[in-house]
Image: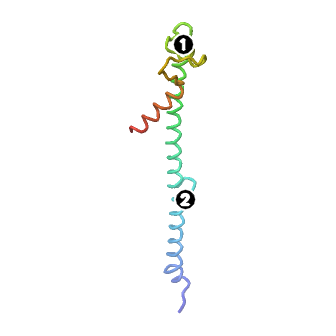
Amino acid sequence: MFSFRRFFFDAFLPAFCVIGIAYNFLIALNGEEGVRAHTLVREELTEKQQELHELAAHREWLARKADMLSVKTLDDDMLDESARRVLGYAAEGEYVMPAAEFDHLIKRLEQQSR
């Protein structure tokens, strides 16, 4: 004989609990604060930290270059480089390379050596 109470405790309640646990598991994986969202945020944080490091290095380079251009500490090499670049002068066998290109080559070599 069919008993509603027996059906409820033997079939419906366990099935409902399994569905609830499965639902919570899926939300824990895919929800706004789930594991995948946490992984994506962590990856984005790593990218932003790398970008911050690159920007800080670029800022230091700009600060050094600005310090070399000040009247009090005018660097002879910087002045010579600027004059040769602007005027297009170079002795035979010399190659005038802009500082930005030189710095770019150094960064590329550092990345290749890692």
Q: Residues within 10 Å of mark 1 (few under 14, many from 20)?
A: few
Of badges 2 and 1, the one in the foreground is 1
- Residue 79 % position (x, y): 54, 13
Residue occupying the far front of the picture: 92
Label 2 sits on a secondary structure element that is: helix
Reply above or below: 102 against 8: above
Please give the residue where the numbered disc 2 appears in the rendered image.
30
- Residue 103 % position (x, y): 49, 28
Q: Quadrant of residue 27?
A: bottom right
Q: Which of 18 and 29 is in front in this view?
A: 29
Q: In this view, does 62 lie to the left or right of 110?
A: right
Q: Which of 87 and 77 is in front in this view?
A: 87
Mark earlier in primary sequence (2, 1): 2
Labelled disc at residue 79: 1
Kind of residue sitting beneath label 1: Leu
Residues at marks 2 and 1, CA–CA distance in whole angstroms: 59 Å
Labelled disc at residue 61: none
Kind of residue sitting beneath label 2: Asn
| Residue drawn at the location 50% of the way across and 38% of the way down | 50
Q: How crowded is mark 2: few (under 14 residues within 10 Å), some or many (20 or more)?
A: some
| Residue drawn at the location 53% of the way across and 45% of the way down | 44
